[in-house]
Structure formats: structure tokens, C-alpha cells
Image (tube, rainbow, N blue to C red):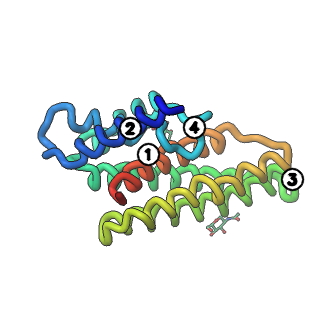
Amino acid sequence: MALSLISSILTTLFLISFLHLPSNAASFNSDLIKGACTSDGVTNPKTWDSNLCIQVLRSYPKISSSTNSKNLVINILEIGISNVTNTGAYIENTLKRVKTGSPLETALKACNQSYENIRLSFKSAFGEVKQDEDYETCSYDLLLARTDYLNECLQAFASEKVGDQSVSNGNQFVILFGQAADTICSLLDR
Ligand SMILES: *[C@@H]1O[C@H](CO)[C@@H](O)[C@H](O)[C@H]1NC(C)=O
Ligand SMILES: *[C@@H]1O[C@H](CO)[C@@H](O)[C@H](O)[C@H]1NC(C)=O
């Protein structure tokens, strides 16, 4: 316990030192992405996959060319908004094809609403960082998106006893982008 506390303090100090460095160090982006993907302080430590997070964030040139922490959050959220919008569009299209009154339709309708709320939360977090540098509200919106709003979709699938692989994948990326951006907003809020 004491050791893990010390190690998390050290990690935090390490991250803070990077947040204040100029952005031209070669390893800067790579370390910044690792910081965004840390498992320290995440909402769901049991399911959080730091390596997957690093791999996904690095796969986007826009994210990996971020020049500082603020810019990194903005870029993660921009990609995240597009990802959430795509999953939402998939849900709407699927809704047109499912049987009226079926359990799958009930679940997808709940997810359609979830994804609208998640998209709006990601968008407001984006605006808070870009325009207002309000990192506390950014964190709060991203927490709400990947907990309360996402849970409505998860619970609808569970209670209707249905599943959809594309929606499950989408859910995983709501958590990935939302948590990574939140981790940086939380650091910037100190
Ligand atoms: C969301 O992002 C992940 C990771 O890059 C990607 O695999 C997935 O296809 C994206 N989903 C949508 C619906 O765009
Ligand atoms: C899905 O959500 C969008 C945005 O809230 C809404 O405009 C649309 O009517 C919903 N579609 C269905 C089939 O519920």
C-alpha cells in the first residue's frame, strides 16, 4: 500500500514535470501518451488496459503529434467525438432494421439515447478545454459520459438479455478516449 502510494506520487511528479517541459523533446509525445494511459486513478482499474490505450492513441497521427497537454486533450476528444458519433450512427441505422417491439430494439433505443448524451458530454468537455481551460468541468463531463450515460446502455443490454458486438466495441472506446482525456484534464486541474 505504502509502496503503491509512493509510486503513484512519483508517477504524478514525473507527469507534472513533463507537463511543464517545452514540447520539442523527441520523447515528449510518447511520454505524454503514456501519462494519459496510466492506470493510476482510473475509474475502472480492473478493466483498464494501459497498453491498449497507448496503442490506440499512437495509431492516430493527430494525437501522436500533439504539442502539449492541452493540445493532447483536444486531439483525443476530437477523435473521441468522431468515434462516438460513428457508433451512434451505427445504432441509429441498426434501429431501422430491427423488429419493432423486440428486446433488441428496446436496448438499442436506450443506447441511442446514451450515445447522444455521451457525444454531447465529449463536445462540452472539448469546448471547456479549448475555450475556457476549465479542466475541472472537463473531468466531470467525461466522468459522467463513461459512467452514468454509458451505464444506461450497458444496463439496457443486460436487462433485455441481448448483445451487439459493434455496440460493445463502441462502449470500450467511450471508456478509452473518455478516461485518457480525463486523466490529462485532472492533471491540468491541479
Ligand atoms: C473507434 O476507435 C477504435 C480505435 O481506433 C476503432 O477500432 C473503431 O473502429 C472506432 N469505431 C468507430 C465506430 O469508428
Ligand atoms: C436517436 O437519437 C437521436 C438523438 O437524440 C434522435 O434524434 C433519434 O430520434 C433517435 N432515434 C431513435 C430511433 O430513437
Q: Which residue is mark 1?
A: 180
- Nearer mark to the viewer, of 2 and 4: 4
Q: Judge whether residue 106 can be spotted in this image.
A: yes
Q: Which-is-in-front pick, marks 2 and 3?
A: 2
- Considering every residue shown, the one lying at the far front of the view is 2
Q: Which residue is mark 3?
A: 102
The reply to whether callout 2 and callout 4 are in contact (CB within 8 Å) is no
Contact between marks 2 and 3 (CB within 8 A): the answer is: no
- Cα separation between marks 3 and 1: 36 Å
* Dot 3 amino acid type: Ser
* Crowd rating for badge 4 (residues with CA inside 10 Å; few <14, some 14–19, many 20+): few
| Whether label 1 touches label 2, CB < 8 Å | yes
* Mark 4, residue position: 45
Q: Which mark is residue 57?
A: 2
Q: Secondary structure at mark 3?
A: loop
Q: CA distance from mark 4 to mark 1?
A: 13 Å
Under mark 4, the amino acid is: Pro
Labels 3, 1: front one: 1
| Cβ atoms at labels 4 and 1 below 8 Å apart | no
Name the residue: 30% across, 70% down.
Answer: 131
Q: Are marks 3 and 4 in contact (CB under 8 Å)?
A: no
Of the two numbered discs 4 and 1 on the same chain, state the one appearing first in sequence: 4
Q: Earlier in the sequence, mark 1 or mark 2?
A: 2
State whether residue 141 is above or below residue 42: below
